[in-house]
Each structure stands twice: as C-alpha cells, then as structure tokens.
Image (cartoon, coloured by chain):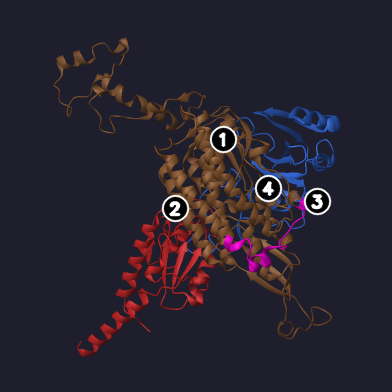
Chain colours: A red, B blue, C brown
C-alpha cells in the first residue's frame, strides 16, 4: 500500500470511466427481443446518449456482447464461438428472459439460459424487456465496468 | 367450383382409389392411398377445372395418441392446395403406417415441397421417396429422434455444447 | 464439398481447366442484417452467385409441440412470438382457427376490433421491414424515422392491450378487453404522424438514384415461379397477382370495408418496396373506416357461441367498490334455507375474521368470475369436438394459416402454423442465382424473413 496504489487506483478509475462511456456492443440478435433492442437503440429511447450507440457487427471489434433473444441448441455453438472470438476486456449482457433462463420455452430446442455456456455479467429479464429496463441494465453494466480493476 | 364439385371431380377421375372424403366445417378433404397420391396431385395441378397451382402447406399428423385411432395407420401426411385462378381449396391426406413410413415425393410438382418434405422428415421421420436432398431442416444433424412424434418427450434436450440438462 | 489440398486452395490448381475455382462464402447465422438468424452459404464465381444453400432452424423454439401441452388459450402467448413484428395477426388467426373448429361466430364488435388491431400490426411490420431493408443499403435515416413511427403505433397497441410487443390480446371467442375511451382520437393523431413519416421516406427513397440502382431488376421471380413456390403476400402482389385473402376469402369484417390492393409489375425488390409502402396507406384507410363503423355490443363469446355481457366480467368487489354489493338481490336455492342474511345475523357474530360469509354474499360477488373459472379449470373449458380445421388470415408476409386437429379434449392435438415467409426464403437461391453478392442483401431484406415464424 502506498502512493503507488493511489495512482493506479486513479488510473483505473479514469480508464473505467472511459470504457463505460464507449461501449461497442455486438447485438447478437435472434428473436423478438431484437425489436425492443431496435426500439432502445433508436430515437425514442436513444442508447447513444450513454455512449453505446455504435453497434459493431464483428466480435473482433466489440467489447460487449448483447445476447438478444432465444438461443436454441443449434445456435449455441455459434454463440460460444462469437464469445471466444472477442478480445478482453469483454462483457456479456443477457437481454430478455430467454437468455437468462430459457423463458417459457422449456423444450427440446432451447438453451435454458446462456449462462450454461458463457459467463454473463448483467441479466435483463422481460419478455421482451421494456426499453427502460434495458437502459437500467445498461447503466448497471456501466457501473460494473467502471468498478472492476482495469487490466490492460 | 365449390368444395362438393371439387370432390365430385376427384371422384369422377379417381373413383375407387379415394379411400374417404369428408367435409368438416366447410373444408373438403379427400384421402388417397400413397401409391396414387402423386398422380392425384399431378391431376389436381394440371386439370383445367381444378387448376391447383399452389401447394399451400405440406405437413403431417401423428395419430398414435388419438382416442379411437391408436390402432390405425400412425401418421397422415396432409396436403393443402389452393388455386389462384379459381380461388378454391382442397385438402388431400395420405395415411402412412409406422413400420413403412415412406411416401413418394411431390417436389417434382411444386418446388416448395422440397423444403416442406424436409421439415416433415425432420419432425416426424416420414421418408419421401425420390426427394433430391432429404436432410433435416429445423433441427441439427446430430439430433436423434423426431421431435413432433407423440412419444418424443418435450424436454428431452440434446445439447451440442454445454451441460447435458 | 470434397477435401481440397493446400495447393488447390492457394494456387488454384485442379478443380477446373483454366485453373479458376469457385469461392465459397458463408453468410453465417450471426450476421449484421437485423432480420434474424439464417445461414446463406453461397458459391461465387467472382462476384456472381452461382449456387446458394440456405440453412434455417436456428430459432426453432418448438412452437407446435408447446401448443399441444396446454389448453387452447395457453397457446396465445406462443403465437405472439411467431411473427413478432405483427403479433396481433397471429393471435387472431389462431383464435379464428379454433372458432372455426368449434363452429361458433364471434360478435360484430369483436370482428371490427380484430380488423383495426390487425391493420395497426401490419403497418408496424411493413415499417420494420422497409426500415431495416433500407438501413442495410445505407439509408440509416429512414430506419430511424420508421422506428419513430412504429413507436407511435406501439403506444396505441399499449393503450389497448397493455404491452408493446408480446401482447397476448386475442382469445378464443373474442379479444381480451375492449378498446379504451378516446381511442379513435389517439389513432387519428398517430396516423397523421405515420403518414408524415411515410412521406419523408418516399422523398428519401423512391426517387433516389442509389436506391433505384440497387433494387430495380434485382431478385425478381416470374409469375409462374412465384405461385409454384407458394409465395403469397406482398411478394405475390408485386408480380401482379391480385391475391389478398382479405378480398378473395374475406373474414372478420373485411367484406364490409372497402380498400384497394396494391399491385406491382415486375416482381423485383423495388416493386416489393412500393407495394409495402402502398399497403401501409391502405391499412391506415381500413383502420380509420373500421373505427368509424365500429358497432357497440359484447366482444366475447363463450364456447357455445353465446355472447358474454362485458359487465359480467367486472368484479366490483375486487375493485374495492363494495358498498352496493351487499344489496345484490340473490335468489338462494331452497336447500340453503336458514342461510340467508337475516337468519345468519340472528345466530352468528358479525365478525368477518371469524365467520364465513353468507351464501348470498359469496355468490353475489364471484358470480361473474365463475364463467372465467370454468374456462380455465383443467379438463373443462374449451373442448371442440374431434375434427380438424384450417384457417388462413392475411398476415403481413402473406397467407398465415393455422391447421388445428382436435381430439375432443381441452388440449389441441396438433397445431400447425403455415408460415408465410418459409416460401420466399426457400426461393432465395432461385432469386439470387446469377446476381451479385451485394444483391443478396436487398433481396433478403425485401423477403422480410421473420425468424420466429420461419423456424417456429
């Protein structure tokens, strides 16, 4: 402990502040939640004012993976591959109850929650979640991003 | 042509090859044997009075848990036809046994039958004789079993990755 | 595909006489076009597409198997998520299929309400389709404007149903609840805004050189092929075939409301875009006329086809309005002699915490609820006689059909949804044969593939 820790602590905060306000998300849109994702991203509920307005449709360029919509067992390997292709630091948001727990699709085709395959940082339940819930989840994600130790 | 006239025209041509007809809630249905279904569909498409140029739907039903029909043929392949020119519809059905669940393909008549038969194969396990490329449509190739059969439990999952739950 | 050696891949040896080989491009399941997850595996000769294989099923959620699990009304939330951009049409088409199976007729007011809500849903679908399609071509502004218009319409839907997207509004025999007061004024306002957005989109797109160059002559199918592939809806009307289920086989109140069918000529992407824009205007016209002609009366029928008085659903007790309740004149059966209020008061302390209520009170306030209760109690409720029925409604993408088989119990034996977008997606290889890679995008956009409906 000492002066060194103070400076790295402040540096961490600064980097965390920069990271949380420049989220490049990869919207992995599959189903109905995609409609609410579009609504959140567009003019009415604008997600650009949080710095998250530029979706990057390539995992190499993104740092937050928004998994939006039901993931079936056929799609699961693709999701895992996309997650593996992202570089650190990366976060995952489970958008919609199908990604949190499988929703009401308790059947042979649906993954019962993507946290069985990839680690999840923020869960946004709802079927589909209202844009206000999405923004709440995004703000929680920003708190999480800022609070962590920023390795680089 | 109204439904009765359509069924009458089918009877005129196919007579005793039709196993049954019924008219329930306004939908006219004719049941054919599988050896004659493709000529019957060709007739429906090419006959000037019927002119069923659109195959609306091709699906199947598993009757193994239907009260009163558990001992009969297990499946029934259902064809819904529509004529754009005459604006009339008909439904054709083919009963299929469980042990010998093969039906001749209709993909030579309407190109959409290709995908619809693939889906029936995927969901029910009914093979289509002469189909150019019979593989699964909705499920992945590693999946075992045919989900829409009545004996497939709804939450038997076969995950490719992740926990076997 | 056969295994290829490194020399073949990098130096072009083998495969064909002049050393050229085709390139295989995989537009994999997770791709930027915001329509859904589908895999287009294309074989290219330079920029030209030689052959494609389309793979679907990445969003298969076992709709048909899930419907078999519950009573008939339990399938309504599943139908919401079929074509999730126009969920009201799915709800109502499914309910109508069961009503056909039961052989009952819904009330007039319900028919008009279904027409109004279906048309609002159809406009939302077309807005999303045209908006997303033009976004992929680079016109991001049009997407923002159309989503703004969609928000206004979603506010209308929220007023009526309580939710924006997955509304579960239809029921077998009617709709969940009546239209709120002042709805027609809200609709007028929302439609005025939508018309303005459509006009702005027209200005931005319809005469736009780049848009025209990318959409005209691309992705066309001939009339015979379109019908042979079973394609219905805006894509069939773009080829010039006036097939619209609302006109050819009218259902609900469509036979009483005049409107026009938008027709195209060439069947290419540009005609499909124009047909969708024209259909949105026609939908607004239909909804406005339906609101003007809305009849009064009950909106729900029970499983025998008798209209249910809406007032019987209102439970004043639950709403806290209990003052008038104790005065409800209830005629008790002679078996309950001695249980009326007078007799009760003579022998029991008037303490609600201890003494059961009189029969008069118990019956007086839950009578309206018994109707509901019977409908949801297991083994009772909606039990259509054994048989099958097929009902088709004009969905936003074409003929949305439900084929339902009943075995006489309270659960459906088989529910089959005939998805209108399966047919054009199956025909995509045919549409883009010979076109360039860049033409796959507007073609796929104009097909309006909705994953929930395609994969069910």
Q: Alpha carbon of mark 2 to alpha carbon of mark 3: how far?
A: 41 Å
Q: Alpha carbon of mark 2 to alpha carbon of mark 4: how far?
A: 32 Å
Total labels drawn: 4
Q: Residues within 10 Å of mark 4 (few under 14, many from 20)?
A: many
Q: Say whether mark 1 and mark 3 are on the same chain.
A: no
Quadrant assignment, res A152: bottom left
Q: Say whether mark 4 and mark 2 are on the same chain.
A: no
Q: Chain of mark 2?
A: A
Position in image of residue A105 (x %, y %): 48, 51
Q: Which residue is mark 4?
A: C232
Q: Which residue is mark 2?
A: A103
The residue at 33%/66% (across/down) is: A140
Q: Residue furthest left?
A: C349
Q: Residues within 10 Å of mark 2 (few under 14, many from 20)?
A: some
Position in image of residue C359 (x %, y %): 27, 19
Q: Chain of mark 3?
A: B
Q: Nearer the viewer, residue A98 or B50?
A: B50
Q: Nearer the viewer, mark 3 or mark 1?
A: 1
Q: Nearer the viewer, mark 4 or mark 1?
A: 4
Q: Is residue C425 above or below residue B54?
A: below
Q: Nearer the viewer, residue C417 or C421?
A: C421
Q: Chain of mark 4?
A: C
Would residue A75 be found to the left or right of residue C333 on screen?
Answer: right
Q: Is residue C381 above or below residue B82?
A: above
Q: Which mark is residue C96?
A: 1
């Amino acid at each position: 402990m000492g002066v060194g820790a103070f400076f790295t602590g402040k540096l961490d905060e600064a980097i965390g502040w920069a990271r949380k306000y420049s989220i490049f998300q990869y919207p992995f849109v599959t189903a109905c939640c995609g409609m609410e994702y579009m609504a959140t991203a567009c003019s009415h509920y604008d997600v650009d004012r949080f710095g998250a307005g530029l979706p990057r449709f390539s995992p190499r360029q993104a740092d937050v993976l928004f998994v939006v919509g039901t993931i079936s067992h056929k799609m699961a390997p693709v999701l895992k591959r996309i997650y593996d292709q992202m570089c650190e630091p990366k976060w995952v948001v489970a958008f919609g109850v199908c990604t949190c727990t499988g929703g009401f699709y308790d059947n042979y085709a649906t993954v019962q929650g993507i946290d069985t395959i990839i680690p999840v940082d923020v869960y946004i339940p709802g079927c589909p979640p209202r844009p206000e819930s999405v923004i709440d989840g995004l703000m929680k994600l920003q708190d999480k991003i800022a609070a962590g130790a920023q390795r680089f | 042509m109204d439904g009765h006239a359509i069924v009458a025209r089918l009877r005129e041509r196919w007579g005793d090859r039709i196993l049954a007809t019924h008219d329930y809630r306004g939908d006219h249905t004719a049941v054919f044997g599988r050896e004659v279904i493709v000529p019957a569909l060709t007739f429906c498409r090419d006959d000037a009075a019927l002119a069923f140029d659109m195959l609306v739907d091709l699906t199947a039903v598993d009757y193994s848990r239907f009260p009163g029909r558990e001992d009969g043929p297990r499946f029934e392949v259902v064809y819904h036809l529509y004529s754009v020119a005459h604006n009339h519809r008909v439904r054709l059905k083919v009963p299929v046994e469980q042990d010998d669940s093969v039906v001749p393909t209709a993909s030579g008549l309407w190109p959409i039958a290709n995908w619809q038969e693939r889906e029936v194969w995927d969901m029910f396990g009914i093979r289509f004789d002469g189909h150019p490329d019979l593989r699964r449509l909705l499920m992945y190739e590693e999946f075992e079993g045919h989900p829409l059969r009545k004996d497939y439990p709804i939450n038997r999952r076969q995950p490719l990755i992740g926990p076997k739950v | 595909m056969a295994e290829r050696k490194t020399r073949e891949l990098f130096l072009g040896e083998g495969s064909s006489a002049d050393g050229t080989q085709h390139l295989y491009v995989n537009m994999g399941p997770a791709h930027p076009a915001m329509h859904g997850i589908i895999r287009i595996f294309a074989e290219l000769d330079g920029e030209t597409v030689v052959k494609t294989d389309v793979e679907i099923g990445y969003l298969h959620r076992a709709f048909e198997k899930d419907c078999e699990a519950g009573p008939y009304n339990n399938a309504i939330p599943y139908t919401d998520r079929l074509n999730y951009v126009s969920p009201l049409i799915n709800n109502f088409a499914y309910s109508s299929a069961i009503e056909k199976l039961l052989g009952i007729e819904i009330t007039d007011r319900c028919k008009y309400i279904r027409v109004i809500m279906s048309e609002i849903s159809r406009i939302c679908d077309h807005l999303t389709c045209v908006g997303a399609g033009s976004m992929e071509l680079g016109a991001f502004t049009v997407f923002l404007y159309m989503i703004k218009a969609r928000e206004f319409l979603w506010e209308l839907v929220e007023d009526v149903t309580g939710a924006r997207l997955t509304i579960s509004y239809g029921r077998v025999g009617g709709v969940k609840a009546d239209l709120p007061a002042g709805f027609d004024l809200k609709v007028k306002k929302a439609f005025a805004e939508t018309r303005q957005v459509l006009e702005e989109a027209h200005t931005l797109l319809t005469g736009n050189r780049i848009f025209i160059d990318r959409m005209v002559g691309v992705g066309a199918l001939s009339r015979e092929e379109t019908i042979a592939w079973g394609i219905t809806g805006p894509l069939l009307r773009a080829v010039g075939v006036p097939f619209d289920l609302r006109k050819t086989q009218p259902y609900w109140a469509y036979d009483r409301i005049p409107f026009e069918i938008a027709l195209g000529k060439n069947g290419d992407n540009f005609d499909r875009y124009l047909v969708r824009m024209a259909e949105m205007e026609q939908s607004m016209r239909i909804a406005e006329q339906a609101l003007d002609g809305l009849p009064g009366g009950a909106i729900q029928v029970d499983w025998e086809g008798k209209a249910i008085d809406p007032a019987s659903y209102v439970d004043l007790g639950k709403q806290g309005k209990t003052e008038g309740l104790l005065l409800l004149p209830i005629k008790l059966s002679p078996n309950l002699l001695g249980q009326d209020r007078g007799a009760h008061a003579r022998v029991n302390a008037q303490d609600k915490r201890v003494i059961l209520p009189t029969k008069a009170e118990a019956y007086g306030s839950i009578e309206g609820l018994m109707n509901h209760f019977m409908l949801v109690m297991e083994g009772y409720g909606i039990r259509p006689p054994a048989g099958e029925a097929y009902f088709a409604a004009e969905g936003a993408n074409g003929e949305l059909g439900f084929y339902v088989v009943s075995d006489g119990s309270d659960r459906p034996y088989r529910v089959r949804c005939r998805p209108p977008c399966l047919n054009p997606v199956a025909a995509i290889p045919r549409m883009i044969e010979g076109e360039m890679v860049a033409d796959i995008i507007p073609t796929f956009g104009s097909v309006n593939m909705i994953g929930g409906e395609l994969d069910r």
